[in-house]
Image (cartoon, grey):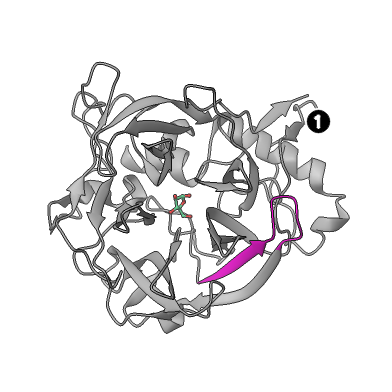
């Protein structure tokens, strides 16, 4: 039961995303710009399948990239994505085929400008404690140093968070010899508030293993799905110490509430946290956004403090092509942007490409929902 449920969902993709994946593959096969990308994917499309039209184009086509964490350092935009590869690892219930082995950093002067791929910034072979699967990273600049935060399974196959440093935003980064003490699960996101305090947000359920943690205790036997009426598992947040390499306080569970102030429930799959959290601040409010995973939405919640609680507000982006959806939000030159990914180039759920589009807000600060593709 578990195998069939997860295989259908996290690992293989389903429904609309899979159908559109095949269609996209056809629509891109003649693109000369994409000729350096690996061969096209298996297609589930039929001759009558609707062709998707994508809102925006991949930022790079020579490699597959996903989970884009964008930052503005010195006025330039730097993107820290996962580097997807086809490692030939069979799919399993924990996403083993997301078997990434290094990171590249991308940069650009401005959105729409030429994108530079700065090559390998960190390789898994140079992380002493790493086992497998370099997943979604994030970065921060402080004290004259660039910090790269990354999740990877340790040699016991438990996801931990590591940190690596560099004097340049593009690396190369040197990894600390051990994971951050007390860290676990996936999808680190660092946010530094106006008072200089940095926070590390993290977590992802199912393949991201968050459901296996009770405090500091790990239990590999815990099932991925909670009962529908249980309070949904929340992402985690911890204050970072001044050296940015350890936690300065306890790991806290972030509360995400509904419009009545009640915690979201596990069965509320269109609103509850799944993975890929990102914190940004707008007009004094803290916006925590994340993926709902098996319902494929990017949604957001707003709070008055960086550690929450956050109240659910709405959908930022409807489903992209592909099973996973993951984003970051930045302001640059007076406009707000959302970086995200889909599978336009490959049609395969584990071979993704990063994109960017403008994020628009209403006068009250609420975010307009983005439709990343339309069928025609
Ligand atoms: O890229 C591997 C995983 O897929 C990320 O950690 C998740 O957020 C999802 O995008």
In the image, the segment drawn in magenta is 102-115
Q: Position of residue 266 (x, y in %)?
A: 26, 29
Task: Identify the residue at image location x=32%, y=24%.
Answer: 268
Residue found at x 36% / y 71%: 163
Q: Position of residue 194 (x, y in %)?
A: 36, 52
- Residue at image coords 43%, 76%: 144
Compared across the picture, whether 158 is left or right of 140 comes to: left
- In this rendering, the answer to whether 98 lies above or below 246 is above
The residue furthest top is 260
Q: At which x and y percent is residue 197?
A: 29, 57
Q: Is residue 110 magenta?
A: yes
Query: Left or right: 214 with respect to 44?
Result: left
Number of numbered labels in the structure image: 1
At x 53% / y 77%, what residue is drawn? 168
Q: Quadrant of residue 234?
A: top left
In this rendering, does residue 222 appear at all? no
Q: Does residue 344 show up magenta in the picture?
A: no
Q: Is residue 118 visible?
A: yes
Residue 168 horizontal side relative to residue 54, left or right: left
Q: Is residue 149 above or below residue 197?
A: below
Residue labelled 1 has its Cβ within 8 Å of some atom of ligand 1 = no
Element type where label 1 sits in the image: loop
In the rendering, at what x and y percent does residue 204 appear?
34, 48
219 lies left or right of 35? left
The residue at which mark 1 appears reads as 47
Q: Is residue 22 or residue 188 the one in the foreground? A: 188
Crowd around label 1: few <14 · some 14–19 · many ≥20 (10 Å): few
The quadrant of the picture occupied by the N terminus is top left
């Amino acid at each position: 039961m578990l195998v069939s449920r997860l295989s259908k969902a996290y690992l293989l993709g389903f429904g609309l995303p899979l159908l559109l994946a095949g269609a996209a593959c056809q629509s891109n096969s003649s693109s000369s710009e994409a000729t350096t990308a690996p061969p096209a994917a298996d297609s589930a499309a039929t001759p009558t399948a609707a062709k998707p039209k994508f809102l925006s184009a991949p930022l790079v086509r020579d490699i597959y990239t996903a989970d884009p964490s964008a930052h503005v350092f010195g006025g330039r935009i730097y993107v820290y994505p996962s580097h997807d590869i086809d490692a030939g690892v069979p799919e399993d219930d924990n996403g083993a085929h997301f078997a990434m082995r290094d990171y590249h950093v991308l940069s650009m002067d401005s959105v729409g400008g030429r994108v530079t791929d700065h090559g390998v910034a960190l390789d898994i072979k140079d992380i002493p404690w790493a086992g497998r699967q370099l997943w979604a990273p994030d970065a921060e600049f402080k004290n004259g140093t660039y910090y790269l935060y990354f999740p990877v399974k340790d040699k016991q196959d438990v996801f931990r968070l590591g940190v690596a440093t560099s004097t340049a935003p593009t690396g190369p980064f040197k990894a600390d010899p051990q994971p951050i003490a007390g860290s676990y699960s996936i999808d680190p996101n660092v946010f530094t508030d106006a008072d200089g305090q940095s926070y590390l947000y993290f977590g992802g359920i199912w393949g991201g293993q968050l459901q296996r943690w009770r405090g500091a205790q790990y239990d590999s036997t815990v099932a991925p799905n909670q009962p529908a009426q249980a309070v949904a598992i929340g992402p985690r947040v911890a204050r970072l110490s001044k050296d940015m390499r350890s936690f300065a306080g306890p790991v806290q569970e972030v509360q995400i509430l509904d419009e009545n102030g009640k915690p979201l429930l596990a069965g509320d799959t269109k609103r509850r946290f799944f993975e890929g959290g990102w914190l940004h601040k707008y007009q004094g409010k803290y916006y925590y956004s994340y993926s709902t995973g098996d319902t494929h939405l990017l949604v957001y919640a707003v709070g008055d403090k960086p550690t929450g609680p956050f109240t659910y507000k709405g959908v930022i982006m409807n489903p992209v092509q592909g099973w996973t959806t993951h984003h970051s939000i930045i302001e640059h030159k007076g406009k707000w942007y959302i970086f995200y990914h889909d599978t336009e180039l490959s049609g395969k759920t584990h071979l993704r490409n990063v994109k960017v589009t403008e994020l628009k807000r209403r006068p009250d600060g609420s975010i307009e929902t983005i439709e990343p593709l339309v069928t025609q």
